Amino acid sequence: MTIQKVLLRYEPEKKNILPAIKAVNEDSGWVSEEAVGKIARYFGVSEAHVFGVASFYDEINTKNLAQLIIEVCDSANCQTKNADKIIKSVESFFRIKEGDSNRKFSLKRMSCVGRCLEGPVIRLNGTIYTKTTSDKAIKLIQEYLGLDY
Ligand code: FES
């Protein structure tokens, strides 16, 4: 679910800030900087205020605790080389949705990292892999997680 959809469940009143932060945390597995910004704008408060509330509670994660952060470049060159197909394959194989995060995975798009000629490019926990196919991405992710599918 998108952050916006989660927020729309709450009236934009100050008393709903904490419940909304908790809902975003539950839905995404954590409260990202992007989420803090969206929550702040929705409730008309500062990002510092939202972050202050979020970081006060132990049960709210302000850091991504996923074991593996999967990023797929979606800038022009990688797009023309089937970046979307890689995202769909990873979503389907590991039953995760783009933008979601849980304890095992976080899957998201990233901007160009300057390896355009070697695309499509993915990044797994900060390590860049080039000339990726759907099969290669799935195999790399399995290796990272020590999974035997
Ligand atoms: S477009 Fe993907 S690395 Fe540049």
Image (cartoon, grey):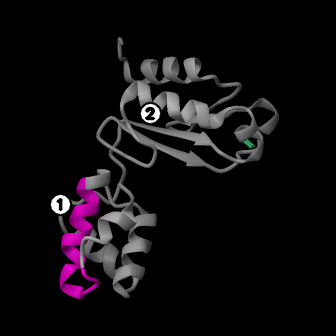
Residue that badge 1 annotates: 58
Residue 1 image point, x, y percent: 35, 54
Camera-nearest residue between 50 and 99:
99
Does 16 lie within the magenta span? yes
Q: Is residue 36 magenta?
A: no
Mark 1 within 8 Å of ligand 1, using the beta carbon: no
**Residue at the image position 50 percent from the left and 21 percent from the top:** 138
**Residue at the spot of label 2:** 91
Ligand 1 visible in quadrant: top right
Q: Badge 2, how many Cα within 10 Å: few under 14, some, many 20+? A: some
Rendered location of residue 90, percent (x, y): 48, 29
Spatial separation of the CA atoms under disc 2 and disc 1: 30 Å
- Mark 2 residue type: Glu
Q: Quadrant of residue 44?
A: bottom left
- The structure residue drawn at horizontal position 56% and vertical position 17%, both measured from the top left corner, is 135
| Quadrant, the C terminus | top left
Give the side of residue 107 with respect to residue 13, left or right. Answer: right
* 66 relative to 60, above or below: above
Q: Position of residue 65 (x, y in %)?
A: 32, 45
- Which residues lie in the magenta part? 11-26
Q: Residue furthest top?
A: 148
Work out whether residue 10 or residue 130 is closer to the camera in this orientation and state it. 10
The image shows residue 51, relative to residue 83, as above or below, that is below
Judge depth for marks 2 and 1 and give the one in front: 2
Which residue is painted at 33% across and 82% down in the image? 49
Q: Which mark is residue 116?
A: none
Which secondary structure type mostly characterizes the magenta part of the structure? helix
Residue 61's x, y, as percent?
Answer: 27, 57
